Image (tube, rainbow, N blue to C red):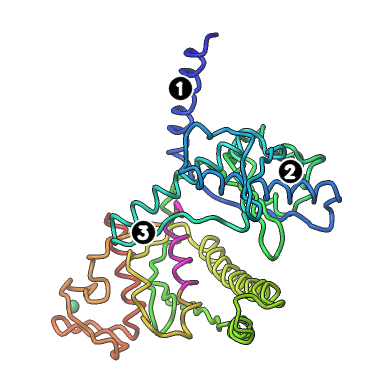
């Protein structure tokens, strides 16, 4: 087979895969690498890989992202006042090309941002690099068994936790090796066949509200109580102090304090995800069909600081619901809070009024939010 035929074949197979994935759901799973189970050799290799990815990134930026260096294995790096040549020996060729491609797509993102808002910014050199793309399943990485993942150039598979989240029928697409203060993670992106919606009797409409977070059309209410983590404000105050006290940028404790703050944020996020996942699981288990309205959660409580966590948790629940095949999303324009289910007339109700009363036909509902959830469900069933 000559080169042209080979390229044609590759292009064809990429197109086929893309077509197949369009009918599937895309999901990313977080897999944790157990640090205690890494041997000395593996730790060194992983650290070197991140360092090499940093060199490559900075090299490409210094060379104005020159396409001829896309798969280079030799880079020039600046050491104090002179340049030295370094060889990239721990990254596979696909990973090397991905560093280049990722910078390209970052640039693209910056450009669209600039076109949209006028503010863009530019790419800067990095002192650390904390993520490496693993793109070719089977070559750059592979799942060995329920606790092991093999990564190209790392001797022996890594012991991981969390692989059982991935369903059996999932098609693994690509992954990312990410280093955080809380440890080493592999994010695996999969494609899962979509399930068909079966319209049965267990249907529900959900109205997202302020008095109660989730109002369900069958009368249930779900509230999410999440408080801001106190440690976050304590740690960020301490971090700020490490700037001011010595009059220079980095005190001895700066990095330690920064990582404590990052850990606290991470912990709060985990609590948020946990709460959101529990609510989602509950809804998923109890109903065959869920109707929600597409509205902007970000507009609520604008400027109210203490509610931020709760709010972002709600945003997450909504985003995940939207991606669920059981969920029907009705348009924002439908006046779910105003419409009367009996006569269809719309009446504006001020936020302070918690009941619903129709002046045209006398219809009354003790909770305006639950009535609104019922209207959302009714509309969704007509769609
Ligand atoms: Zn009415």
Disc 1 packing (10 Å; few <14; some 14–19; many ≥20): few
Residue bearing the label numbered 2 = 149
Quadrant of ligand 1: it is: bottom left
CA distance for labels 2 and 1 = 29 Å
Check if residue 177 falls in the magenta segment: no
Residue span colored magenta:
312-325
Q: Secondary structure at mark 1?
A: helix
Q: Which mark is residue 12?
A: 1
Check if residue 319 falls in the magenta segment: yes
Tell me where residue 146 sits by quadrant. Answer: top right
Q: Is residue 334 above or below residue 154?
A: below
Residue 312 visible in the current orientation: yes
Marked residue nearer the N-terminal end (3 or 2): 3
Residue 178 placement, left or right of 345: right
Q: Position of residue 383 (x, y in %)?
A: 27, 54
Outermost residue toward the front in this view: 81
Q: Secondary structure at mark 2?
A: strand
Tell me where residue 233 sits by quadrant. Answer: bottom right
Disc 2 packing (10 Å; few <14; some 14–19; many ≥20): many
Q: Is residue 10 above or below residue 75?
A: above
């Amino acid at each position: 087979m000559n080169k042209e035929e080979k390229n044609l074949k590759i292009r064809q197979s990429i197109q086929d895969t893309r077509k197949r994935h369009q009918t599937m759901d895309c999901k990313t799973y977080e897999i944790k690498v157990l640090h205690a189970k890494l041997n000395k050799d593996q730790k060194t290799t992983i650290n070197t890989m991140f360092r090499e990815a940093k060199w490559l990134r900075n090299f490409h930026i210094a060379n104005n992202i020159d396409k001829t260096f896309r798969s280079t294995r030799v880079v020039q790096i600046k050491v104090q006042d002179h340049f030295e040549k370094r060889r990239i020996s721990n990254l596979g060729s696909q990973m090397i090309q991905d560093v280049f491609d990722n910078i390209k797509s970052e640039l693209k993102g910056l450009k669209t941002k600039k076109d949209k808002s006028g503010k863009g910014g530019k790419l800067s050199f990095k002192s650390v690099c904390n993520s490496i793309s693993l793109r070719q399943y089977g070559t750059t990485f592979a799942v060995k068994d329920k606790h092991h993942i093999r990564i190209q150039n790392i001797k022996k598979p890594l012991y991981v936790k969390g692989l059982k989240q991935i369903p059996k029928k999932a098609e693994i697409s690509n992954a990312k090796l990410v280093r955080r203060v809380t440890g080493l993670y592999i994010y695996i992106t999969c494609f899962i066949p979509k399930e068909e919606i079966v319209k049965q009797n267990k249907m529900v409409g959900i109205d997202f509200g302020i008095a109660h977070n989730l109002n369900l059309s069958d009368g249930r209410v779900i509230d999410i109580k999440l408080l801001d983590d106190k440690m976050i404000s304590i740690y960020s105050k301490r971090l700020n102090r490490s700037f001011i006290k010595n009059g220079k940028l980095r005190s001895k404790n700066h990095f330690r304090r920064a990582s404590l703050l990052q850990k606290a944020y991470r912990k709060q996020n985990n609590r948020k995800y946990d709460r959101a996942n529990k609510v989602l699981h509950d809804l998923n288990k109890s109903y065959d069909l869920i109707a929600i309205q597409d509205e902007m959660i970000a507009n609520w409580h604008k400027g109210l600081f203490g509610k931020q966590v709760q709010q972002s948790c709600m945003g997450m629940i909504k985003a995940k619901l939207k991606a669920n095949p059981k969920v029907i999303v009705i348009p924002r324009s439908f006046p779910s809070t105003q419409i009367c289910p009996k006569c269809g007339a719309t009446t504006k109700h001020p936020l302070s009024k918690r009941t619903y009363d129709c002046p045209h036909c006398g219809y009354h509902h003790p909770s305006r939010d639950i009535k609104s959830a019922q209207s959302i469900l009714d509309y969704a069933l007509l769609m």
